[in-house]
Image (tube, rainbow, N blue to C red):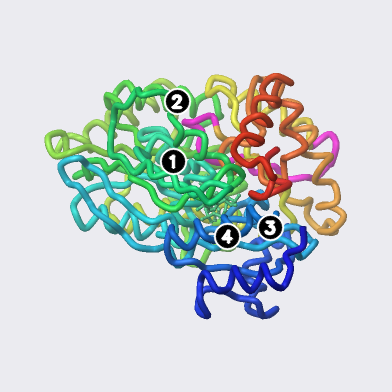
Amino acid sequence: MKPSDDTLARLKAVVGPKGFIDGADEMTPYLIERRDLYQGRAALILRPQSTGEISAIMKIAFETNTRVVPQGGNTGLVGGQIPDASGDEIILSLARMNRIGALDALNNTLTVEAGVTLAAAQDAARKADRLFPLSLASEGTCQIGGNLATNAGGTAVLRYGNARNLTLGLEVVLANGDIWNGLKGLRKDNTGYDMKHLFMGSEGTLGIITGAVLKLFARPKSVETAFVAVPDVDAAVALLRRADTASGGLVTGFELMPRIGVEFVLKHQAGSTDPLGQPSPWYVLVELSAGETRAGRLREVMEALLEAGVAEDDATDAVIAASDAQRAKLWAMREGMSEVQRLEGGSIKHDVSVPVSRVAEFITRASEAVSAAMPGVRPVPFGHVGDGNIHFNLTQPVGADKAAFIARWDEMNAIVHGIVRELGGSISAEHGVGQMKRDEIATTKSAVEMELMRTVKKALDPKGILNPGKVV
Ligand SMILES: Cc1cc2nc3c(=O)[nH]c(=O)nc-3n(C[C@H](O)[C@H](O)[C@H](O)COP(=O)(O)OP(=O)(O)OC[C@H]3O[C@@H](n4cnc5c(N)ncnc54)[C@H](O)[C@@H]3O)c2cc1C
């Protein structure tokens, strides 16, 4: 329902003059997603500063059937944080909920408000010689609330798990304004349903996350990073298993890059150089990290692993970063992989996962299928091969019309997602469902599972005011 002037005035009164935005120009950054794939309109943007204010907002929204779109750093890639085009929804931005709370060094936990950026949470941990391992290229802007609402993944999932595995407690404001304070720092608590897991990954459709207790880890004292040429994706997966066994579980990152992606980086990323002399069809970025006791030996482990990899034909060449600056340069290649595709023209994206053992089959089949449907298309499959999560992006054919290429987005998605389904995979490995994949998830889930999701939604948001039109 369109909020009345009276409702808008009541909402503004909750947050005070500094806590809302209603001017068209100031609203714009909140209404557009960074790639400009989604644009919406809003009746009002609220920027509350406390859980109490959010509770008061939701009480008014519940009473007046006002629809609320929670928004964190607005870095989501599936349009979940963008309102619809009606102009009737309000955006609830968590940006001013950015206080860092207690760091309990003995319990290895950090309590934060939901609007704390991921980089600020990592920094707070670093200052106490601890590690908060969630790591995304968007970490300077995305917020902990957004990370948990999307169950974000990133480059360290292999070792530490995704956002849900890094969270011990949550505080959530429910659709009716009730506050659930579950800010516990417990590693064991089997007292019934584990409610926090309902809210994590729910993309703002079940409640507003206002705070979290995050799990910290020992900060690695030694890190070794190698850029490795591999002949094919099967060899990359074989090298992953070899690395895991040889290091005794010290693999922190294992990221796949194709030659075409590396060439795009060399062309578009200032200061980039080819780390190896000869081109290779595929590369992996391998990172091992260890604590104090094994620190001295990590270099030997990496060298032995690479030697064995070359001897067994899993690798053809490699370079180990000799300094932090070199390590940063290697990671910049991986992290720039999306951006450089944008500079090559249109890019049709797929964020999919399959069992790790089937990644090579997936990439081969999907590349052949899209090339048959669109001659000249340039597949750039890259990403978290260690998790079976590939960003199977398609760059437009050289010289093609960008708009005509992007117009075939759904057709390409259908081809790629069809293969993913056949391989028992997921059409959204880490970015979520949002608006983009809402209608499609029903094709990958059973009727029973879809009905369970609708039942949960109805129970927690009976009036359908929380992020409507997203996920279910
Ligand atoms: C360059 C780049 C790289 C990226 N790399 C990765 C990656 O490696 N792995 C990965 O998983 N993602 C990645 N992402 C996607 C994105 O950064 C993540 O999804 C991130 O977790 C979103 O956080 P945010 O604060 O920006 O949330 P937003 O974009 O603002 O919101 C995302 C969703 O969460 C909901 N939401 C936000 N805050 C709350 C809250 N407090 N309570 C309830 N719901 C809320 C919104 O309604 C929306 O549905 C990347 C994005 C970019 C731009």
**SS category of the residue bearing label 2:** loop
Q: Which contiguous range is marked in magenta? A: 371-388
Q: Which comes sooner in the sequence, label 1 or label 4?
A: 4
Residue type at the position of mark 3: Thr
Q: Nearer the viewer, mark 4 or mark 3?
A: 3
Number of the label disc, if any, that sits on residue 64: 3
Instruction: Work out how far the residue at label 2 is from the one at label 1, CA to CA, in angstroms.
Output: 19 Å
From mark 1 to mark 3, how far is it between C-alphas? Answer: 34 Å
Q: Nearer the viewer, mark 1 or mark 3?
A: 3
> Circle 4 sits on which residue?
74
Q: Position of residue 328 (x, y in %)?
A: 37, 56
Mark 3 close to ligand 1, CB under 8 Å: no
Q: Is mark 2 within 8 Å of ligand 1?
A: no
Q: Secondary structure at mark 4?
A: loop
Q: Is residue 28 above or below residue 89?
A: below
Q: CA distance from mark 2 to mark 4?
A: 31 Å
Q: Quadrant of residue 427?
A: top right
The amino acid sitting under disc 1 is: Ala
Q: Which residue is mark 1?
A: 163
Circle 1/circle 3 CB separation < 8 Å:
no
Describe the element under mark 1 as helix, strand or loop.
helix
**Which one is in front in this view, the residue at disc 2 or the one at disc 4?**
2
What's under tag 2, amino acid-wise? Tyr
The answer to whether marks 2 and 1 mark residues whose Cβ atoms lie closer than 8 Å is no
Would residue 439 be visible to someone looking at this image? yes
